[in-house]
Image (spheres, rainbow, N blue to C red):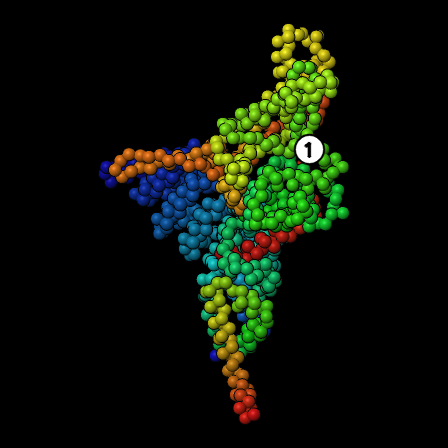
Amino acid sequence: MFTAEESKMLSEDKVKNIKYEYEELETDFNFYMINLLKSCLQLNPEQFEVFYSSDFIKKAKVVNLLVLHPNKYTMKRVSTSLLDLCKTFRAIPDSKQNPVLFFAKLLTDQLGNILTHETLKQSEYFNLFDAILRLINHADLDKISFNSASVAEMLFNTITSRHIIEQDDVQDPILSGCILMLSTLDELFHDSIKDGCPGIYSKDFLNFVLSKGLFSRVRPSEDDDTISYPLCKHFQTRGYAFRLLQQLFGYDNMTDIAKFLEPYIKTGSWRSNKREKWNIVSSQLSHRTSYVGLVNLGCTCYMNSLMQQLYMCPQFRNFICTAQDLKKSVMKLEDNVLYHSKYLFANLMKNKSLDFNPVVFFNSIKDYSGEPMPTNEQRDVDEFLNIYMDKIEQNIKGGEDEKHLSTIFGGAFAQELICKDCPHRSSREEQYLSVSLEIKNKANIHEALDLFIQGEMLEGDNAYMCERCDKKIDTLKRCCIKKLPNTLILSLKRFEFDLETLSRYKLNTYCEFYDDLDMRDYCQETLAKKELLKTMTEQNLTYEMLSEDQKAIHNINLPDNYYKYKLKGTVVHYGTADGGHYYSYIKDRDSDKWFEFNDTSVREFDPAELPEETFGGKLKYEHKFMQGGKQYTQTEKLNNAYILIYEREEFINTEKVLELRETEKSQLEKMSDSYKFESRPCKIEPEILKDLMLSFDKHWIANKMFDD
Amino acid sequence: MDVDESDEELYKLKFSTLFVLCLALRSESKLRFASKILPQIRENVKRSMNFAKWLVKCFCNKHTINELVASCWNTESGRMITSLLKLALRKVMEEEKPEVKKISKLIMEN
C-alpha cells in the first residue's frame, strides 16, 4: 500500500498527466478512469482546476462520451460516475472548484448543440443534467450565470416544434429529455420561468400537450399511414409528459383537461360487459418480433398456421394486396375471400397489436358444400389450402392476375404412360397446388419423392392398349413433375386410414427434410432424358439415329435455378389423428431469421432445433434407478412436420423458362434476365388502409388510457 | 362545511367520478389509485346533496346499472361501486326522509 504522501504524489501525477481520448478508451476503462479520478481528487481537492483545464473537459469530450459512445452501458456508467463525483464534492465552497456548478455550466453550454444533433443518443446527457440541477444550491446560480428561463424557453421551443419520431418501442431522446428537464426546471425555478417564459403556462401549450403530445391520433397528412400523433408514444416519455402536465397545469386547469378527456372516456371501447375488460393490464402493444399473431377461434389453428405461411411469402402477400377483384361488384362482401384476405394481410402488416382476430376472414370461407366452416371443428390444413386457393381463383378468374398466381404456386404433374416394347409414350397434364408424399417407412423426402415417381407396371391382363401400335403392351404408368412452381408445397401424408380398425391414425415416423432441395431428378424431362440415354447406350444409338421426338427430349435444357429450392417454412401438427394442434415455423425472407407462429404467440426460433421439433420419430427417455442403473424407454414424438414450404432462391417466370427449354445451356444462363419474375410492389388498398387506421387509432387510444 | 357547489367544481367532481368508475376501476394498475381518490369522492358525496343526487340519477339509467353493477366482474371494483352508490342513496334519503315519512303515514292511514 502507498503511504499518504505517496498517494498524494500519485494522485497529483495522475490528474496532471492522464490524457483522455475517449475514442480510444474501452468501456470499463472509461468507468474505472473516472472512479480513479474521483479517488485522486478526494485525496487532493485543489487539483480540480487541473482537471477542469484538461482537454477531456475543455473540449467537452466528457459530453461526447455521454452522447456519442456506441455502448449505452458505458454512457450510463460515465453519467453515474460524474454524478457521484458531483455528489461527493458538492460542498466545496469555492465556486471555481465545485463540480456541481462546473458541470451545470458545461452541460448548459452544450445544450444548444445537443438539441440540434438528431443522431446523438442524448438520454444520459439529460439524465445527468436533470440530476445535477437538483444538486445546485440556488444561491450559487448567479456565479455561473445560469438563466433558467432561457433554458426553459429553449426546451419549450424544441418540444413544440418537434416532429414525430417515437413509436411504442422507439424513444425520441431529445423529446423525452426536454420534457423531463422542463418539468424539473419548473419544479426548481417556477417563479423565474413564469416571468421569463410565460408561454409554458399558456392554454395553447396545455392544448398542445393534450392533443399533440399525449392523446389525439391525427396524421400530419392523409397519405401517410406510418406517422401519426401523439409525439409521446414511448412509455417513459409519456410518463414524463404526464408529470409535466400535472406540474404545469394541475388542478387549476382541471376543467380544460377534463373537457378534453371526457369524450374518450365516454366512448371508450373497453366499456363493455366482457369479463376481460374488467382487468385491463397496460401492456406493450406489439410483439417483440414485430409480427402479429392470430387469435384461435376454437379449433382454427390450421387456418392460422397456414395463413401465416402464406403471408410470410412476400410474392403472395404482394399479390393478394394488389390483386384486382373481378367479383367485387357481384359478390356479397361477407363472402368475398379475396377482400378479407387483403384485410387480414393488411392487419398482419400494419397492426401494432399483439394479435388480430381473423373471425370475419374465417366466416367468409365456405367449404365445398357452401356451408360456413364451424370454428370448433379441426380441419386438415392441406384441404384448407385447396379450399382457400379455389376461393381466391374465383375472384381473379379471367384476369391477368390468374397467371400471376399460377406462377407463384401453380405446378403441373405429368401423368405418363410409357410403353416398354415400343417407343410410344403418352402424357396428360394435371395442375397441382401441393405434392402429397407417402412417408411410411421413408427416412427422408428424397426417398418419398423417389416413391412418388416410381409408378406401376401395367402388364399381363392389365397391360395398356397402345393406340399407335394397336396392341396390348406392358406399360409403365407413373406420375412425375412437368412444371415446378416458384413456391413448392410438399404435404407429408401423415394421416392414414386403417382398414382393419376402420379408423384414422397418424404416422409419427421419422422423415428428414433438408434446407436445400433439388427437384431435377423428379421432373419429366430429366426422367425422359435418363431413359433415352440408357436406351442409346443399350442399343448403341447415335444422336442422328434418334426420332424427332427423341431429339427434342435429348435437347431439353433448363437452368439450374429452376430446380433448386430452399426451405422457407413448415407447418407442424402436434397430436393424433383425432385431435391436435397446428403451428408454423417460418423463415423471414429478409432477415433469414426463423420464427414460430403459434396462434397469438410469435417468437424467434432457432433453426438448429428443426430436426428435433419437426422430423418426428421417437423420443428416448432415460430412467435412473435409486439403486443404480438406467433404463431407456421410447415413445413416439407427437409433433412432426406436415407441410413443407420450399421456395426458389430467386423467383423466375416459369412459363418463359419452359418456352426456352430447347436453348443451349450456356445460352440459357445468359438469358436469365428474360425469364425474371416480375414482383409487384406491395400496396394496401386505400379503402382498407383508411378503415385499418381508424381501428388502430381507436385501439391505441383505448390502450393508452390505461397508461400507468 | 359544505362543499363548493359552483358549476365548475361540480363538473370537476363529476369528471373525477366518471374517470374512477368508467376507467380506473377497470385497470389492475389503476385500482390502487382509485382507492386513493374514492375516499375524496365519498367525502364529497357526504357533503354535497347535488352531487349525491347526480350520482343516484346516474344509477337510475339501465345502461349504467348494466355496465357498472350487473356486468362488473371484478369483486374489488364492484365493492367500491356499490359502497359509493349506497353512500349517495343515504345522502339523498336525508332530504327525502320527511316526504317518505308522509307517504308511509298516508299508506298506514288508508
Q: Quadrant of the N terminus of chain A?
A: top left
Pinpoint residue A500: horizontal percent, then vertical percent: 52, 37
> What residue is at 72 percent from the left and 41 percent from the top?
A395
Pinpoint residue B63: horizontal percent, then vertical percent: 59, 68
Residue B60 falls in image quadrant: bottom right
> What residue is at 54 percent from the left and 37 percent from the top?
A499
Q: Nearer the viewer, residue A287 or A426?
A: A426
Which residue is disc 1 drawn over?
A: A406
In the rendered image, the vertical position of residue B48 relative to residue A280, given as above or below: below
Instruction: Residue type at mark 1: give it.
Output: Ser
Q: Secondary structure at mark 1?
A: helix
Specify whether A81 is left or right of A639: left
Q: Nearer the viewer, residue A223 or B60?
A: B60
Pinpoint residue A586: horizontal percent, then vertical percent: 54, 36
In the rendered image, the vertical position of residue B77 relative to residue A226, given as above or below: below
> What residue is at 47 percent from the left and 39 percent from the top?
A638
Residue B106 falls in image quadrant: bottom right
